[in-house]
Protein backbone atom coordinates (compact mmCIF):
# COMPACT_ATOMS: atom_id res chain seq x y z
CA UNK A 1 0.00 0.00 0.00
CA UNK A 2 2.88 2.36 0.80
CA UNK A 3 4.34 1.64 -2.62
CA UNK A 4 1.06 2.56 -4.37
CA UNK A 5 0.84 5.77 -2.36
CA UNK A 6 4.44 6.60 -3.36
CA UNK A 7 3.70 5.98 -7.04
CA UNK A 8 0.58 8.12 -6.88
CA UNK A 9 2.49 10.91 -5.19
CA UNK A 10 5.21 10.74 -7.85
CA UNK A 11 2.65 10.63 -10.65
CA UNK A 12 1.01 13.83 -9.43
CA UNK A 13 3.96 15.74 -8.00
CA UNK A 14 6.78 14.92 -10.40
CA UNK A 15 5.27 16.65 -13.47
CA UNK A 16 4.63 19.81 -11.45
CA UNK A 17 8.18 19.69 -10.07
CA UNK A 18 9.70 19.24 -13.55
CA UNK A 19 7.59 22.07 -14.95
CA UNK A 20 8.64 24.35 -12.09
CA UNK A 21 12.30 23.52 -12.71
CA UNK A 22 12.02 24.22 -16.45
CA UNK A 23 10.06 27.42 -15.89
CA UNK A 24 12.57 28.67 -13.33
CA UNK A 25 15.32 28.51 -15.96
CA UNK A 26 13.41 30.72 -18.41
CA UNK A 27 14.20 34.42 -18.22
CA UNK A 28 14.96 37.33 -20.50
CA UNK A 29 18.64 36.69 -19.82
CA UNK A 30 18.56 32.97 -20.68
CA UNK A 31 16.37 32.82 -23.79
CA UNK A 32 17.77 33.55 -27.26
CA UNK A 33 17.26 37.00 -28.77
CA UNK A 34 14.27 37.60 -31.03
CA UNK A 35 13.48 40.24 -33.64
CA UNK A 36 11.23 42.89 -32.09
CA UNK A 37 11.13 45.43 -34.93
CA UNK A 38 12.17 45.85 -38.55
CA UNK A 39 12.32 48.81 -40.89
CA UNK A 40 10.52 48.35 -43.15
CA UNK A 41 8.01 46.42 -41.10
CA UNK A 42 7.49 42.83 -42.24
CA UNK A 43 4.51 42.46 -44.57
CA UNK A 44 4.52 46.10 -45.65
CA UNK A 45 3.59 46.90 -49.25
CA UNK A 46 4.35 50.19 -50.96
CA UNK A 47 7.74 50.59 -49.24
CA UNK A 48 9.56 53.60 -50.70
CA UNK A 49 12.16 52.19 -53.14
CA UNK A 50 14.41 55.13 -52.18
CA UNK A 51 14.84 53.64 -48.70
CA UNK A 52 18.61 53.35 -48.22
CA UNK A 53 18.84 50.95 -45.30
CA UNK A 54 17.05 48.02 -43.75
CA UNK A 55 17.06 47.85 -39.96
CA UNK A 56 16.43 44.97 -37.61
CA UNK A 57 16.13 45.44 -33.85
CA UNK A 58 16.58 42.54 -31.43
CA UNK A 59 15.26 41.99 -27.92
CA UNK A 60 18.72 42.28 -26.36
CA UNK A 61 22.24 43.58 -27.00
CA UNK A 62 24.03 41.72 -29.78
CA UNK A 63 27.65 40.88 -30.63
CA UNK A 64 29.06 43.62 -32.85
CA UNK A 65 30.54 42.43 -36.13
CA UNK A 66 28.34 39.32 -36.33
CA UNK A 67 25.26 39.01 -38.53
CA UNK A 68 23.51 36.70 -40.96
CA UNK A 69 21.49 38.56 -43.59
CA UNK A 70 20.64 35.48 -45.67
CA UNK A 71 19.56 35.42 -49.30
CA UNK A 72 16.37 33.47 -50.02
CA UNK A 73 16.99 34.02 -53.74
CA UNK A 74 19.04 36.45 -55.84
CA UNK A 75 15.84 38.11 -57.11
CA UNK A 76 14.47 38.80 -53.63
CA UNK A 77 17.66 40.06 -51.94
CA UNK A 78 18.45 43.78 -52.16
CA UNK A 79 21.69 45.14 -53.58
CA UNK A 80 24.02 45.74 -50.64
CA UNK A 81 25.74 49.13 -50.59
CA UNK A 82 28.26 48.44 -47.85
CA UNK A 83 28.72 46.30 -44.78
CA UNK A 84 26.10 45.86 -42.09
CA UNK A 85 26.72 47.72 -38.83
CA UNK A 86 25.19 48.02 -35.39
CA UNK A 87 23.83 51.26 -33.98
CA UNK A 88 25.02 52.49 -30.58
CA UNK A 89 22.07 50.73 -28.87
CA UNK A 90 23.81 47.39 -29.75
CA UNK A 91 20.36 45.96 -30.55
CA UNK A 92 19.79 47.42 -34.02
CA UNK A 93 21.67 46.19 -37.09
CA UNK A 94 21.57 48.29 -40.26
CA UNK A 95 22.06 46.96 -43.80
CA UNK A 96 22.80 49.67 -46.42
CA UNK A 97 20.86 48.79 -49.60
CA UNK A 98 19.54 49.88 -52.95
CA UNK A 99 15.95 48.82 -53.60
CA UNK A 100 14.12 48.57 -56.91
CA UNK A 101 10.51 49.65 -57.47
CA UNK A 102 7.67 47.11 -57.55
CA UNK A 103 9.71 44.24 -56.17
CA UNK A 104 9.10 41.79 -53.35
CA UNK A 105 12.07 41.30 -51.05
CA UNK A 106 12.56 38.32 -48.74
CA UNK A 107 15.52 38.19 -46.36
CA UNK A 108 16.21 35.56 -43.74
CA UNK A 109 17.83 36.67 -40.50
CA UNK A 110 19.62 33.64 -39.04
CA UNK A 111 18.55 30.47 -40.80
CA UNK A 112 20.00 26.99 -41.28
CA UNK A 113 23.78 27.10 -40.83
CA UNK A 114 23.84 30.93 -40.98
CA UNK A 115 23.34 31.86 -37.33
CA UNK A 116 25.74 34.74 -36.71
CA UNK A 117 23.21 37.15 -35.20
CA UNK A 118 24.14 36.37 -31.57
CA UNK A 119 23.56 38.06 -28.24
CA UNK A 120 26.50 39.07 -26.09
CA UNK A 121 26.41 35.68 -24.35
CA UNK A 122 26.73 33.86 -27.70
CA UNK A 123 23.12 32.67 -28.10
CA UNK A 124 21.96 32.75 -31.74
CA UNK A 125 18.77 34.67 -32.44
CA UNK A 126 15.60 32.88 -33.44
CA UNK A 127 15.30 32.74 -37.27
CA UNK A 128 13.14 35.47 -38.82
CA UNK A 129 11.90 35.98 -42.38
CA UNK A 130 11.54 39.64 -43.39
CA UNK A 131 9.30 40.08 -46.44
CA UNK A 132 8.15 43.40 -47.91
CA UNK A 133 7.27 44.92 -51.29
CA UNK A 134 8.36 48.23 -52.74
CA UNK A 135 5.99 50.61 -54.45
CA UNK A 136 6.47 52.30 -57.79
CA UNK A 137 8.30 55.29 -56.31
CA UNK A 138 8.44 58.68 -58.02
CA UNK A 139 6.19 60.41 -55.51
Image (cartoon, rainbow, N blue to C red):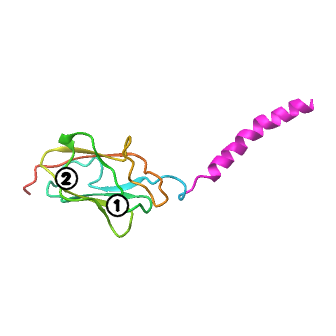
Label 1, on which residue?
Answer: 65
From the image, state whether disc 2 or disc 1 is nearer to you. Answer: 1
Magenta highlight on residue 118? no
Label total for image: 2
The residue range painted magenta reads 1-27
- Measure the C-alpha gap from mark 2 to mark 1: 28 Å
- First in sequence, mark 2 or 1: give its number: 2
Residue 91: name its quadrant. Answer: bottom left
Few, some or many residues within 10 Å of mark 2 (<14, 14–19, 20+): many
The residue drawn where x is 47% and y is 56% is 122
The residue drawn where x is 16% and y is 44% is 103
The percent position of residue 30, horizontal first and vertical second, equals 55, 55
Magenta highlight on residue 5? yes
The residue drawn where x is 92% and y is 29% is 1
**21 horizontally vs 57: left or right:** right
Q: Secondary structure at mark 1?
A: loop
Q: Secondary structure at mark 2?
A: loop
The residue drawn where x is 38% and y is 65% is 90
Residue lying farthest to the bottom in this orientation:
88
The percent position of residue 99, horizontal first and vertical second, equals 15, 52
The answer to which of 44 and 14 lies nearer the viewer is: 14
Q: Which quadrant does the C terminus fall into?
A: bottom left
The percent position of residue 137, horizontal first and vertical second, equals 10, 53
Few, some or many residues within 10 Å of mark 1 (<14, 14–19, 20+): few
Do the CB atoms of the residues marked 2 and 1 lie less than 8 Å apart? Answer: no
Residue lying farthest to the right in this orientation:
1
The percent position of residue 82, horizontal first and vertical second, equals 20, 59
Q: Main secondary structure of the magenta part?
A: helix
The answer to which of 55 and 8 lies nearer the viewer is: 55
Residue 47: which disc?
Answer: 2
Residue 107: which disc?
Answer: none
Amino acid sequence: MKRIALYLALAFCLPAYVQAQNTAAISIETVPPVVVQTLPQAGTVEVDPDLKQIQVTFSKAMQRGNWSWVQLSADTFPTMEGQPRYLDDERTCVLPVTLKPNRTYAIWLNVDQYTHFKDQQGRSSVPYLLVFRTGSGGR
